[in-house]
Image: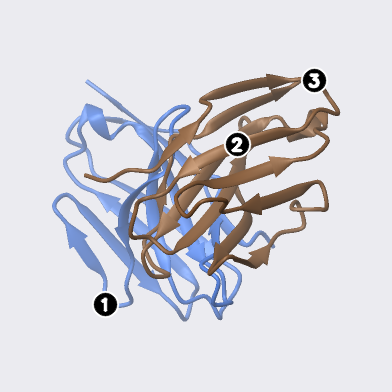
Chain colours: A brown, B blue
Amino acid sequence: EPEVTQTPSHQVTQMGQEVILRCVPISNHLYFYWYRQILGQKVEFLVSFYNNEISEKSEIFDDQFSVERPDGSNFTLKIRSTKLEDSAMYFCACSRQQETQYFGPGTRLLVL
Amino acid sequence: RKEVEQDPGPFNVPEGATVAFNCTYSNSASQSFFWYRQDCRKEPKLLMSVYSSGNEDGRFTAQLNRASQYISLLIRDSKLSDSATYLCVVGGSGNTGKLIFGQGTTLQVKP
């Protein structure tokens, strides 16, 4: 069964540093998403991406965040200058049409 | 009012019990509804989509009441392996695929 992969599984960084979280979606899927889950809290939508454009972004997804599909297979989330409150699990998801979304295993980000 | 609201539990039930989870959502324009399952420190995994006509998948039955903006999940003959957090998820009203998650209901099935 095809699956979404994410790297790294864990990332520890210093406040103010840039991080790039990587995702390889399922190959024939066209819609891509990032979500985050702060420990003990609910999963929160960050951004949706289709046809090389952001379709929708949440209030969390401010100017410090960006997404990119650099090579037709990877889908990345960049945080330019990390803050303590960015510590969370970041999930990538994808869907073939705008229906069932399949989630990757997540990247656990810890900002010190 | 929260966009998607669930009783966080935990629900502690013996094996073989029937357990029901409820969820309410605030946006009457929402068009898609799901139950996801999340194991500790893992990603959400789709359990089932929810339709107005109701749908059943083995021991799991989901119902949607659009008038009341209410979604339910019934688990019959619960197994130890059903222990997890069950997430009520609603699609955003825009055409972007955004999913809005409830905080989840924790189920612990005991032998």
Q: Which residue is at 19% across, 46% downward?
A: B76
Tag 2, which secondary structure? Answer: strand
Residue A32 vs B103, above or below: the answer is below
Q: Secondary structure at mark 3?
A: loop
Classify mark 3: residues with Cα within 10 Å, few (<14), some (14-19) or many (20+). some
Characterize the local packing of mark 1: few (<14), some (14-19) or many (20 or more) Cα atoms within 10 angstroms. Answer: few
Amino acid carrying mark 1 in the image: Ser
Residue at position x 71%, y 29% from top?
A87
- The chain ID associated with circle 3 is A
Where residue A21 is drawn, which disc sits there?
2
Q: Cβ–Cβ below 8 Å for labels 3 and 2? A: no
Specify the farthest residue to the left: B58
Residue A108 position in % (x across, y down): 58, 27
Q: Amino acid at mark 3?
A: Gln
Using the numbered discs, state the Cα–Cα distance from disc 3 to disc 2 in whole angstroms: 15 Å
Q: Residue furthest front?
A: A71
Image point (24%, 44%), residue name:
B18
Does A58 appear above or below A91? below
Residue identified by numbered label 1: B53
Question: Around disc 2, counting alpha carbons within 10 Å, would you say few (fewer than 14), some (14 to 19), or many (20 or more)?
Answer: many
Label 1 or label 3, whichever lies nearer to me, is 3
Q: Residue type at mark 2? A: Leu
Q: CA distance from mark 1 to mark 2?
A: 40 Å
Quadrant (top left/top right/bottom left/bottom right) for the N terminus of chain B:
bottom right
Any mark on residue A14, and which? 3
Do residues under tags 1 and 2 come within 8 Å of each other at their CB atoms? no
Task: Identify the disc placed on residue A84.
Answer: none
In the visual, does B87 lie left or right of B56?
right
Please tell me if label 1 and label 3 are on a single chain: no
Secondary element under disc 1, as helix, strand or loop, is: loop
Q: Residue B72, percent across and down?
A: 37, 60
Q: Earlier in the sequence, mark 3 or mark 2?
A: 3
